[in-house]
Image: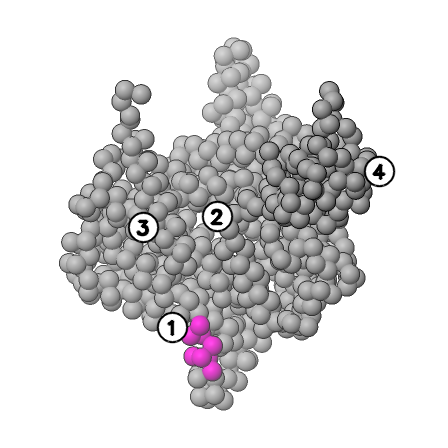
């Protein structure tokens, strides 16, 4: 190449710095994210002693791709079902904490004389915790299987969603900080509309596509198809006026509900790691040492706000959600590190011109400091709880216990709640689908018909097709969960119930009529009598057509089957008693036997896990095979997924042992001595092999090598049958591990050719 493009030179510098810093921070047992940030600082124009990136604009493009892959991966880890099963506690905790920290950010910004938008963005950034760093800290400390860890993971998922909403809100606010209330509501309604539409269509279509193409799918094709879907949604989100990151997250969350989610996540992980590294390096490139020296006081103050104020707010938020004091402290103190979404929000603010440039290096510095403090904060939770609990007044303890019991009772669904949920959900989902069909009819179908037919016939044909397509979706909008036994039970329960029930029925009828009127009005100016006739005909058709009912039920069955496919698949891997263990302070954990582990090949009796850690092995998942209640002589192999049962403390000790085993494996030198080699061994007159047969030579039994041929000067090698006797002058071809071959040579005192 006569001229190397600047982008390639810059990328080489970025990856070189990132690689060196990754190794260094791995050696120091620190998060590699910090290494990437340091690498960015070294490659930035602010570091005069090292080469600098020349084209920052191109690097920013790569960083945007990194954000897309980051959020796509976050979406793959997201699950609506897990979120719903977590209950109201994480929802209350996240909403309370986010609102409080937003106010704190505005107050801190005002304290330093910053603008309202700087304070608003700061509050949003301080409310976000780092998922990756917290997960790593839990793994290092052996806490991932403890009860409070699942609550923290639910909170982290919700924080990601809140961050997405913040990005949309801040994008609407722009740089001016003022927005019309109606415009804001329209933006939120637009987001909900597209989110429901994309999710419903995605869950209906994507699993069908993956099933149909399953025989054609290998790792390569599945990766390409998944990335194509990701970037297709990125484009659709951009066309709809949302950020590309939002589209990536949506597609990730859709694919997360498929059986292939874990496989896709594993395939995407290396690509995500590459582009995420570029993104975090670009974060480090924006750190100006002069600006850090100038704003050292805000950095110190904001760090203390995160470690102290946010921890206190977090404890209050979790207790408000009905969690005891100790669990609230453990959960809140675990959320110390300011996370990756803070960088993304800061990048958005700078690109919109909404915040000052100095905010970026400040929040990066705070993130670095809080990351280093994360293990200490997690360890502090139990000592602080031990100090607080004995000193807490009994009156407050009883009040908290009553509140916890009351919050649990409040979660019980009553008849009205079930009824309203059953009615409102289909109204929202099918209403969105009907609106989408009307939009497609006007924007896509009619132009197509107009290009093929005269104008009047184009309108009539479009109207007919639109009404036919709308019918399977208007029927459940009108009738779903209406006139059910539960409906009549409420109807007959009290006279007072009849008015609201009737109002809901009439409201749904009005919604269907409005959709029909809009569809007709788009393409045909009918008289009132004709319009009433069309409405009456369609209503009768929806009420009494068995074919339409079957079509609707088939659509719903396919959708629910796709939505439940992952859960049904995972249910076969998770025993039914897993949920019942929680009430007895026992938990079911899954661990994977690492490659090259000393545990591999040993049976359960030899490992003595029950003796050392008090845990019990419930099942072993080996490929598609499940071994329930395995016997003591059952060996384990690398890659086995082992389900174990124990308390928090027992699982913590077991996790510590597992981490120690992984650390031992990481410290092992490359296993080059295990490679199989082929060698020639000459049998001399003084060799002990002379006169012995292949069977009794000990080459296979003692030296763990294998004779593959014997050369006696003939055209073909002699086949090494067991009774063949070695003779002087034989050249023996032996295959085995290099160390075993050398041992054979020493034992037989032979020379290698």
Front-most of residues 628 and 342: 628
Tell me which numbered mark, 2 or 4, is placed earlier along the sequence. 2
Label 2, label 3: how far apart the Cα atoms are: 21 Å
Where's residue 317, x and y in %?
A: 44, 69
Relative height, residue 629 to residue 165 (above, below): below
Q: Mark 4 touching mark 1, by CB under 8 A?
A: no
- The residue depicted at 73 percent of the width and 35 percent of the height is 728
- Region of the chain picked out in magenta, as a range: 379-386
1 vs 3, front mark: 3
Relative height, residue 615 to residue 248 (above, below): below
Find disc 2 in the rendering and name its residue: 74
Mark 3: few/some/many CA within 10 Å (<14, 14-19, 20+):
many
Front-most of residues 26 and 484: 26
Label 4, label 3: how far apart the Cα atoms are: 67 Å
Find disc 4 in the rendering and name its residue: 723
2 vs 3, front mark: 3
Q: Is residue 549 left or right of residue 15?
A: right
| Numbered label attached to residue 312 | 1
Tell me which numbered mark, 2 or 3, is placed earlier along the sequence. 3
Mark 4: few/some/many CA within 10 Å (<14, 14-19, 20+):
few
Please tell me whether mark 4 sits on a helix, a strand or a loop: loop
Mark 2: few/some/many CA within 10 Å (<14, 14-19, 20+):
many
- The residue depicted at 44 percent of the width and 69 percent of the height is 378
Please tell me whether mark 1 sits on a helix, a strand or a loop: helix
Label 4, label 1: how far apart the Cα atoms are: 81 Å
Find disc 3 in the rendering and name its residue: 37
How does the figure colour the protein chain or chains?
A: one colour
Front-most of residues 699 and 131: 699
Q: Please identify the dominant SS of the magenta region.
A: helix
- Can residue 151 be seen at all in this image of the molecule? no
Tell me which numbered mark, 1 or 3, is placed earlier along the sequence. 3
Q: Quick check: is 258 in the magenta stretch?
A: no
């Amino acid at each position: 190449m006569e001229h190397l493009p600047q982008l390639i030179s810059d990328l080489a510098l970025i990856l070189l710095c990132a690689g060196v810093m990754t190794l260094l921070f791995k050696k120091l047992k620190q998060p590699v994210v910090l290494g990437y940030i340091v690498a960015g600082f070294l490659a930035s124009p602010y570091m005069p002693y090292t080469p600098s990136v020349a084209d920052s604009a191109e690097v920013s493009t790569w960083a945007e791709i990194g954000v897309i892959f980051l959020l796509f991966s976050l979406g793959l880890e997201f699950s609506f079902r897990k979120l719903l099963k977590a209950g109201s506690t994480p929802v209350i905790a996240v909403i309370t904490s986010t609102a409080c920290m937003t106010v704190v950010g505005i107050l801190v910004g005002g304290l330093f004389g910053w603008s309202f938008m700087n304070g608003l963005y700061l509050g949003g950034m301080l409310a976000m915790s780092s998922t990756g760093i917290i997960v790593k800290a839990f793994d290092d400390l052996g806490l991932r299987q403890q009860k409070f860890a699942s609550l923290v993971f639910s909170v982290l998922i919700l924080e990601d969603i809140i961050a997405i909403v913040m990005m949309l809100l801040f994008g609407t606010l722009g740089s001016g900080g003022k927005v019309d209330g109606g415009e804001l509501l329209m933006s939120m309604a637009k987001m909900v509309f597209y989110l429901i539409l994309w999710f419903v269509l995605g869950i209906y279509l994507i699993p069908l596509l993956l099933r149909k193409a399953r025989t054609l799918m290998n790792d390569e094709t599945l990766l390409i198809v998944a990335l194509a879907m990701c970037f297709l949604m990125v484009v659709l989100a951009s066309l709809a006026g949302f950020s590309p990151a939002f589209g990536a997250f949506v597609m990730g969350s859709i694919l997360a509900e498929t059986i292939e989610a874990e496989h896709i996540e594993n395939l995407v992980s290396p690509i995500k790691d590459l582009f995420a590294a570029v993104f975090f390096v670009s974060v480090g490139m924006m750190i100006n040492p002069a600006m850090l020296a100038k704003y050292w006081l805000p950095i110190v103050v904001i760090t203390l706000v995160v470690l102290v104020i946010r921890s206190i707010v977090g404890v209050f938020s979790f207790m408000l959600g009905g969690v005891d004091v100790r669990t609230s402290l453990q959960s809140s103190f675990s959320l110390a590190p300011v996370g990756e979404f803070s960088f993304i929000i800061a990048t958005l603010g700078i690109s919109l011109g909404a915040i000052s440039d100095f905010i970026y290096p400040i929040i990066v510095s705070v993130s670095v400091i809080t990351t280093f403090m994360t293990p200490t904060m997690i360890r502090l939770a139990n000592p602080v709880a031990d100090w607080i609990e004995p000193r807490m007044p009994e009156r407050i303890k009883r009040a908290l216990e009553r509140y916890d019991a009351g919050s649990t009772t409040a979660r019980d669904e009553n008849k009205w709640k079930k009824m309203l949920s059953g009615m409102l959900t289909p109204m929202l989902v099918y209403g969105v689908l009907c609106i989408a069909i009307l939009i497609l009819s006007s924007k896509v179908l009619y132009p197509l018909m107009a290009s093929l037919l005269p104008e009047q016939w184009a309108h009539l044909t479009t109207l007919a097709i639109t009404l036919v397509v709308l019918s399977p979706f208007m029927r459940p909008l009108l009738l779903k969960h209406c006139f059910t036994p539960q409906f009549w039970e409420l109807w007959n329960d009290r006279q007072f119930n009849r008015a609201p029930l009737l109002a809901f029925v009439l409201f749904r009828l009005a919604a269907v009529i409005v959709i029909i009127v809009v569809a007709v009005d788009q393409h045909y100016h009918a008289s009132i009598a004709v319009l009433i006739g069309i409405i009456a005909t369609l209503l009768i058709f929806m009420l009494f057509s068995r074919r339409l009912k079957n079509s609707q039920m088939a659509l719903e069955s396919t959708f629910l089957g796709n939505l439940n496919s992952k859960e049904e698949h995972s249910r076969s891997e998770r025993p039914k008693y897993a949920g019942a263990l929680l009430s007895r302070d026992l938990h079911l954990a899954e661990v994977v036997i690492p490659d090259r582990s000393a545990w591999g090949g040993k049976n359960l009796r030899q490992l003595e896990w029950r003796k050392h850690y008090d845990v019990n092995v419930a099942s072993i998942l080996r490929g598609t095979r499940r071994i329930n209640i395995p016997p003591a002589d059952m060996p384990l192999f690398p890659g086995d997924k082992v389900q174990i049962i124990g308390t928090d403390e027992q699982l913590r000790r077991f996790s510590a042992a597992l981490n120690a085993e992984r650390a031992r494996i990481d410290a092992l030198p490359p296993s080059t001595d295990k490679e199989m080699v082929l060698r020639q061994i000459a049998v001399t007159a003084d060799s002990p092999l002379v006169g012995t047969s292949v069977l009794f030579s000990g080459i296979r039994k003692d030296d763990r090598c294998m004779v593959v041929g014997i050369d006696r000067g003939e055209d073909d090698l002699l086949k090494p049958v067991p009774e063949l006797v070695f003779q002087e002058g034989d050249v023996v071809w032996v295959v085995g591990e290099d160390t075993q071959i050398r041992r054979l040579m020493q034992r037989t005192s032979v020379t290698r050719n």
